[in-house]
Amino acid sequence: MALLDQVASPRDLDGLSESELTTLAAEIRDLLVTTTATTGGHLGPNLGVVELTLAIHRVFDSPRDRVVFDTGHQAYVHKMLTGRARDFAGLRQEGGLSGYPSQAESDHDIVENSHASTALSYADGLAKAYAIRGEDRHVVAVIGDGALTGGMAWEALNNIAIAKGSRLVIVVNDNGRSYTPTVGGLATALTSLRTNPRYERVLELIKRRLPAMPGGGATYEVLHAVKKGLKDALAPQGLFEDLGLKYVGPVDGHDRSAVEQALRQAKNFGGPVIVHAITRKGFGYDAAERHEADQFHSPGPFDVHTGDEHPKARIWTDVFADEIVHIGERRGDVVAITAAMMHPVGLHHFQARFPERTFDVGIAEQHAATSAAGLALGGLHPVVAVYATFLNRAFDQVLMDCALHKCGVTFVLDRSGVTGDDGASHNGMWDLSVLQVVPGLRIAAPRDGARLRELLGEAVEVSDAPTVVRFPKGSPPDDIEAVGKAGSADVLVRSGTKDVLVVAAGVMAGTGVGVAERLVAQGLGVTVVDPRWVKPLDEALVGLAREHRLVVTIEDNGVVGGVGAVFLQQLAAAGVTTPVRIHGIPQEFLHHAKRGRILEQIGLTPQAIALGVIEELAEQQPAHSEV
């Protein structure tokens, strides 16, 4: 029987020998690799924290002691050690384990976080709450060096430093990477500390010789004291101790015993402590360690033996990646910005072609937006590429720093709408609602690859207001050509009498065409329109709505405040009384499942929408006008 099968809770680790713990670590890595080879998922980050997570759960008593993982995509090992290993085959599958911490799964999970740089603030509040309530509990926050590039983490550290009685241990999982190598001044400081050859040589000498000396049981305390002197000499301004925080490390994050010693020291200190652990993303799996781009940060299904990912179809991001380079070649004023996601958002080709015009700001979406405003004020046209869900974090900057100053900044939102596998926090279902309130801002929603190229070109021509281009996860559909125009909108279907007007935003245009096919088969007349620019909506759509018996809007955004809701307001203001039926994403946090499955569950399919239209029209009078 495998050791991992015997671990139902962290306390089952207590009686294991050193050799058994080494075997257990190997079993965990095997399960990580074999599972993600089938399901996809965050492999590299979890391979890098196996020993670190084992040490945390041997030193602290979860769930009484709370463990909060920043970003949360490195919590797979935590899930295994808290009784969920047997369910790992269902990772990121409908009805199976979430790819992030989940309160519904276990009492050991408290924060369902997957947006970076938040754990320290959660942990600060938890530790203060336990202190006020007089509860003897510790809080452990695990945060990567990449997440420390986010300003919110430093806001938290500023407050944690003065909470002298807070029983909070901050574990900095320092692997030099977020998705790709961590950038910025913080990264440089951490790199200089962990790579200083004098530091490493002297530290290794001490580690070898101290255990052989009399009193070897005090090895850690002596080593820590010597290390403190070395660090002061080699890094005179200690990065964290300058904030007033107790600092322990750096420690080899793959030496479980050393990490345990460091954590016990921190636990016994009685105040906030930072434990600096050096790890390697992808550690223990050759294919991941050799993967230069991101150490298998989040691969799709792959061959376990070779590490080769299964062939992938061309995705929306690839279309953007090619087109932004073409734009850059035509426009010397176009620059690119991303927040630690150069490859995931498709800016790596632009970076290779125009390195001096490409800026990775780290996990700092707020800074990205306002820096872009500054670039625009300086005469350039920035293109800020992020996942749609992460633009939520920079709303104030889009509103007050970009829009108020009429800055020509283009935001490109990858993975808009339903993304599926990564769960509630990654669905890009908020932007069309949130951004509707921003004066002057324009939003484009391409329905296919050709329209992405077309609308991106139009967006970067706007110099006096921010623009947004949004597209979903996955592969773009075949191009859908227009059969006519309605103002700036494309008419995709014009068939029969004017019974139903379908206004389908972005990729949902294909769904709209599918609805039309079913309605036409039932003898109904249908017009399908793709607005292209969904903010503002062209006034020509108001005239079309006036002529039809029913208006149906379809979007992959929340129904509250989205395209359909705004169009309904627009029609009311114009005195148009045509009934409107809005189809979008319910305003709720969606469970993880494949995108197609979720769309089916929430009724965003041609069959479901067409059925509702037929039932609606059955209650109305017959058609009243001809095309």
Image: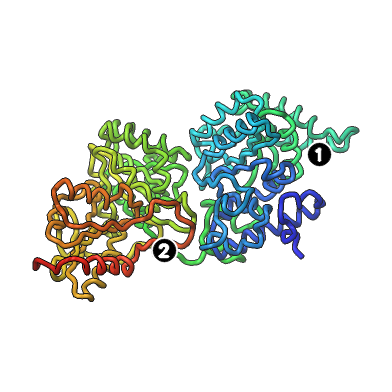
Quarter the N terminus occupies: bottom right
605 on left or right of 5: left
Residue at coordinates 59% horizontally, 28% vertically from top-left?
A: 160
Residue at coordinates 27% horizontally, 50% vertically from top-left?
A: 565
Q: List the residue tagged with mark 1.
A: 208
Of all residues shown, which one is farthest toward the front? Answer: 619
- Is residue 118 in view from this perspective? yes
Dot 2: element: helix
Quarter the C terminus occupies: bottom left
Q: Position of residue 263 (x, y in %)?
A: 72, 38
Q: Nearer the viewer, mark 2 or mark 1?
A: 2
3D distance between C-alphas at marks 2 and 1: 60 Å
- Is residue 352 in view from this perspective? no
Q: Position of residue 190 (x, y in %)?
A: 59, 35
Q: Position of residue 229 (x, y in %)?
A: 72, 25
165 on left or right of 401: right
Dot 1: element: helix
Up/down of 45 relative to 615, above or below: above
Amino acid type, callout 1: Arg
> Mark 1 packing: few (<14 Cα in 10 Å), some, or many (20+)?
few
Q: Which mark is residue 443?
A: none
Q: List the residue tagged with mark 2.
A: 601
229 on left or right of 144: right
Up/down of 210 relative to 331, above or below: above
Between 524 and 462, the one lying in front of the other is: 524
> Mark 2 packing: few (<14 Cα in 10 Å), some, or many (20+)?
few
Residue at coordinates 57% horizontally, 66% vertically from top-left?
A: 303
Q: Earlier in the sequence, mark 2 or mark 1?
A: 1
Amino acid type, callout 2: Gln
Between 438 and 445, the one lying in front of the other is: 438
Q: Position of residue 124 (x, y in %)?
A: 58, 33
Residue at coordinates 84% horizontally, 33% vertically from top-left?
A: 218
